[in-house]
Image (cartoon, rainbow, N blue to C red):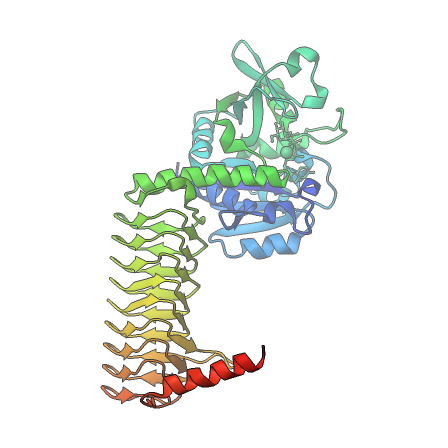
Amino acid sequence: MTDRSCLSIVLAAGEGTRMKSALPKVLHKVAGLPLVGHVVAAARGAGAGDIAVVVGRGAEEVRACLDNNTGKLETFIQTERKGTGHAVLAAREALARSYDDVLVLFGDTPLVEADALLTAREKLANGAAVVVMGFRTDKPAGYGRLIEENGALIAIREDKDCSDAERAITFCNGGLMAIDGRQALALLNAIGNDNAKGEYYLTDVVAIARSRGLSVVAAEVAAESVLGVNNRVELAEAEFLWQARRRRAAMLDGATLIAPETVFFAHDTVLGSDTIVEPNVFFGPGVRVDSGVTIHAFSHLEGTTVGNGAEIGPFARLRPGAELGEKSKVGNFCEVKKSQVGVGAKINHLTYIGDASIGAGANIGAGTITCNYDGMNKFKTEIGAGAFIGSNSALVAPVSIGDGAYVASGSVITQNVPENALAFGRARQKTIEGRADDLRTRQRSIKDAAK
Ligand code: UD1
Ligand code: MG
């Protein structure tokens, strides 16, 4: 397959009015990635070296979100919405470069899989001029029907143009199409708009190709992989199906999910083998977890890397820039942001670590806070290897605690603490023998006077 050039045209100019949103439809997210991003990723996975996205409203926003993708990607603007056939031709300039394979995809079908696209490309390589991805459903209303004669696909009839007999057909157009790149432009140019909607239908390519004696074939895909998102209910359905797929893949790759239906992944989550994920864990984008890690219940991670054998949670929050070293621990009700946590370091209870680096084997006591923000600027806290921070300490940044240093509990540390030093930053305790009784007597007299 690698020797055949491939262009994927992703149609994303739809209004998406049923989303009832200020955001263009294709920018709504599944697993933290815009719908159109999933489609582009599948096209890339199927070997599409070049991608052309056809956008309408919100072109700038669509472009901005796609800029992060690797590989060649162009956007074309469809100024008027005149149908899918018209939309594809907005990318005429790209089509004119005459690729071997052209894949036409819809930007609102995030569950499309690279494998199905590869199957379609194989059929092109074997001589088909047009390949249509069909699916079966007992609720075909709204979809184009695949009209077959003697087992051969002869046309796609849009719902509004169907006869009663055709409307009963349950084999439908999933909307993904592969077209021989050398014929694509000629076939697409031949599409007219003489139909119930007065639109240029991409699907007419089937009958046009047939009339020219070219080979047209249908390939069947699972209905769920061509699910189109048109409203927020379908957005949630797509998320549901995507998560189910991803959980299964994580388990087959060697992670234990105790209650898989309660674990939520992002599109780019990486989980190493022998990682155990307890119930109710959420992965935002940008998380990489090495192997042998335990993530206890109710933890929330994003933009985080976790080294081998680390332990997280329960109830931990790891925010962007948290880098946990091997065998480190971040325990319950702890938050870590933009900080490196050294090998074997422990942050076990009720702590905030932000803009900090923590050396190997350091121990951060319960309730420690790095005071990284003065209301205007952010500052760094450095904690050396093997340092011990007593419970309920406030480390006022910028500040550094040397290797092996010891901070007494309840300290407010505003000055650097050298290596192996012991620092107290709190009032000295005063104890007065017998004074508790005196105190109670006074309190009682105040209470009696108030009666
Ligand atoms: C389309 C197919 C139908 C198929 C169904 C599968 C056609 C004519 N019909 O119908 O056979 O069963 O998808 O879901 O292709 N778009 C543009 N510009 C336009 C029109 C559409 O960019 O002028 C984009 C939309 O953003 C969307 C995609 O093309 O991503 C499909 O358009 P849509 O209007 O949803 O087509 P359907 O009526 O669903
Ligand atoms: Mg649609």
Residue 169 visible in image:
yes
Q: Where does residue 163 sit, x and y in percent of width and height?
A: 70, 14
Which x, y percent locates residue 279? 38, 46
Q: Position of residue 389 (x, y in %)?
A: 30, 78
Q: Nearer the viewer, residue 155 or 184?
A: 155
Q: Is residue 186 above or below residue 430?
A: above
Image: 15 above or below 358: above
Q: Position of residue 388 (x, y in %)?
A: 27, 78
Residue appearing at x 24%, y 86% in the figure: 419
Ligand 2 placement by image quarter: top right
- The residue at the point 48 percent across, 23 percent down is 220
Residue at screen point 51% across, 21% down: 217
Q: Residue at x 28, y 54 (%)?
A: 293
Residue 83 location, quadrant:
top right
- Quadrant the N terminus occupies: top left
The C terminus is located in which quarter?
bottom right
Q: Nearer the viewer, residue 170 or 183?
A: 170
Q: Quadrant of residue 164?
A: top right
Residue 397, can we see it?
A: no
Q: How many marks?
A: 0
